[in-house]
């Protein structure tokens, strides 16, 4: 007699987690004296030291595998473990370099990690679904092949939230990933496991993806660097998802690392090579020379909710540093943010999330999906009633309007929302880029530095800050700026939810009462980043502006070696 769905689920969970622990056990125990010289190096420095014959790929690899085990023990960030294959590849690279004196490519000997969605031959790509377990892929994703061909050594794959449509990081198969800077807080999502691993130096370079902030949110929560390229700059071939064919908002694929230079290294290596289906644009990396004086626009709030004092301070600190270097910084208000978020909700909910949620099969639905998927499953009269209550008794038209859009739609309505998206894009260029002639934009990544586990269930619209740049398809870089400091980041006296035009309901949940999400004392030490935004296809300019900002801010306790055992 066959196993029931519950028994199969538990059997798959047990077998996958046991296999992971067995594979992790093959690594050496982390030793700071032996390993830190390698862990404290950027990816670029690793390649340079190997090229100078000071290090070998094998020695570098052992250090990162040891640290990956520590990262897993701390945060539960790893899914698939490739240690034995990695050792074989490192040995091949070392023998080849010893024989020829030539590096394999720009990533020679760099230990890399990939978000679980990327297919790697011989390993599962479950994205946390128990029923996708024990079904190994037969070939590498195109971007995996690109990295291997450049000499990268892939050591692990990393955890994601269920359906990859939340900015927490938990699923039935692998469980919850925590923030390396605070166990009670999430690492973010959907590239959350990747961010947690990199923050702890468990990998030298990683790859994630982004449809609503999935690269940027965990990057900020965990204090690393990342680059969301323009969509289609990097191939999606072999990157799994749970809503294939949905292209109203394009997914962007890009690097996560521990320095700007490492994000640039990835882009120099990957940009331009087309996959077999010619689905990515054939634009190679184009070096840019920035003017000595740049013009930045900036804002402190996405106009949907008020940003926390910590996130406001991160933007202000960035602007202050740029002005000291002679750059021009002009405040503006992103008036199209609400329309962009409305368009995103209208498009994303067009089928009522039927296809996305069907992939759960027998897996219990994670709480992080509660609010984002609530609207479409309610009868129209109930959904309208909730909107009326929010508007009438809470004075929250914003919540009411967004919630009313979360419903299934006809093909005609879907086309109308696609047209709205195109109008938002044209208006953004006209009202922001062309009117002001900005080189770049400095913006908060989110209204909060991070959230405690479970809070995404009712605060999923906080992704509006990042969603804007998916709707208009801008390249965006993320830099860590500062850390939460209770002495600087307390909520101002007399704070009133909704007083500045944001959502009363969300701001009350964020800031008011005994269950308020924002707690600078509990969040002390949590990293806070900013977005560095450019025009579509100006990815290289964004990387250049990231470097300008990074240098203007100076050393501030981020990068390789910044996470220490307590």
Image (cartoon, rainbow, N blue to C red):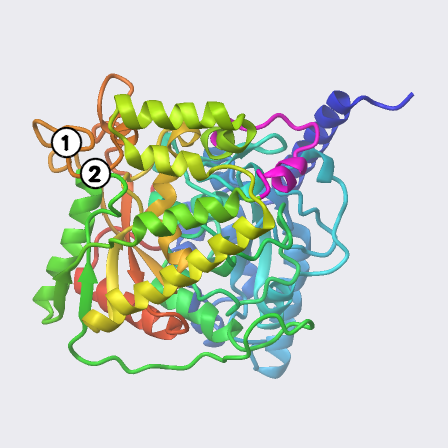
- Residue drawn at the location 41% of the way across and 23% of the way down: 385
Q: Residue furthest right?
A: 1
Image position, residue 266 (x, y; %): 47, 68
- Residue drawn at the location 66% of the way across and 28% of the way down: 363
Numbered label attached to residue 491:
1
Q: Which residues are magenta?
A: 351-368
- Compared to 360, does 423 lie above or below? below
Dot 1 falls on a residue whose secondary structure is loop
Q: Quadrant of the C terminus?
A: top left
Lateral position of residue 39 relative to residue 408, left or right = left
Label 2 packing within 10 angstroms: few (<14), some (14-19), many (20+) = many
Image position, residue 268 (x, y; %): 46, 75
Label 1 packing within 10 angstroms: few (<14), some (14-19), many (20+) = some
- Residue drawn at the location 63% of the way across and 32% of the way down: 173
Question: Which residue is at the front of the view, 134 or 425?
Answer: 425
Asked if the magenta segment contains residue 298, the reply would be no
**Residue 256 visible from this viewpoint:** no
Return the disc, 2 or 1, that comes first in the chain's sequence. Answer: 2
């Amino acid at each position: 007699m066959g196993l029931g769905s519950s028994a199969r689920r538990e059997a798959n969970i047990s077998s996958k987690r046991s296999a992971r622990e067995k594979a992790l056990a093959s690594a050496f125990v982390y030793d700071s004296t032996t390993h830190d010289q390698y862990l404290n190096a950027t990816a670029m420095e690793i390649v340079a030291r190997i090229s100078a014959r000071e290090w070998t790929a094998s020695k570098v690899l052992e250090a990162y595998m040891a640290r990956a085990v520590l990262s897993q023990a701390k945060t539960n960030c790893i899914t698939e473990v490739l240690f034995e294959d990695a050792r074989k590849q490192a040995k091949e690279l070392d023998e080849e370099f010893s024989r020829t004196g030539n590096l394999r490519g720009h990533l020679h000997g760099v230990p890399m990690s990939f978000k679980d969605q990327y297919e790697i031959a011989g390993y599962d790509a479950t994205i946390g679904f128990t029923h996708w377990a024990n079904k190994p892929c037969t070939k590498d994703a195109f971007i995996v092949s690109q990295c291997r061909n450049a000499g990268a050594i892939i050591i692990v794959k990393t955890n994601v939230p269920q359906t990859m449509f939340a900015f927490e990081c938990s699923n039935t198969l692998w469980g919850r990933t925590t923030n390396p800077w605070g166990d009670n807080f999430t690492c973010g999502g959907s590239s959350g496991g990747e961010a947690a691993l990199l923050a702890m130096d468990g990998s030298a370079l990683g790859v994630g993806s982004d449809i609503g902030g999935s690269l940027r949110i965990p990057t900020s929560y965990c204090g690393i660097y990342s680059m969301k390229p323009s969509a289609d700059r990097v191939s999606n071939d072999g990157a799994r998802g749970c809503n294939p064919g949905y292209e109203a908002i394009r997914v962007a694929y890009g690097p996560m690392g521990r320095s700007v230079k490492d994000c640039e290294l990835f882009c120099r290596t990957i940009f331009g090579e087309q996959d077999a289906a010619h689905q990515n644009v054939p634009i190679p990396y184009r070096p840019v020379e920035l003017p000595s004086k740049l013009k930045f626009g900036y804002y402190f709030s996405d106009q949907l909710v008020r940003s926390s004092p910590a996130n406001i301070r991160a933007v202000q600190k960035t602007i202050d540093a740029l002005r000291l270097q002679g750059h021009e910084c002009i405040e503006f208000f992103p008036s199209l943010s609400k329309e962009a978020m409305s368009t995103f909700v209208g498009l994303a909910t067009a089928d009522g999330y039927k296809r996305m949620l069907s992939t759960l099969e027998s897996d219990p639905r994670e709480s992080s999906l509660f609010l984002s998927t609530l609207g479409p499953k309610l009868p129209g009269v109930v959904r309208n009633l909730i909107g009326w209550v929010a508007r009438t008794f809470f004075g929250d038209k914003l919540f009411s309007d967004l919630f009313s859009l979360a419903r299934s739609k006809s093909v005609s309505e879907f086309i109308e929302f696609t047209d709205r998206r195109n109008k938002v894009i044209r208006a953004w260029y006209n009202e922001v880029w062309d009117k002001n002639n900005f080189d770049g934009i400095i913006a908060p990544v989110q209204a909060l530095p991070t959230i405690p586990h479970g809070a995404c269930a009712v605060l999923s619209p906080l992704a509006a800050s990042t969603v804007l740049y998916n709707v208009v398809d801008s390249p965006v870089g993320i830099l860590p700026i500062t850390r939460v400091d209770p002495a600087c980041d307390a909520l101002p006296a007399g704070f009133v939810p909704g007083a500045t035009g944001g959502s009363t309901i969300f701001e009350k949940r964020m800031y008011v009462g005994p269950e308020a999400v924002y707690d600078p004392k509990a969040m002390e030490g949590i990293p806070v980043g900013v977005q560095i935004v450019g025009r579509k296809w100006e990815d290289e300019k964004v990387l250049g502006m990231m470097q300008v900002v990074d240098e203007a801010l100076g050393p501030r306790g981020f990068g390789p070696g910044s996470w220490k055992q307590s």
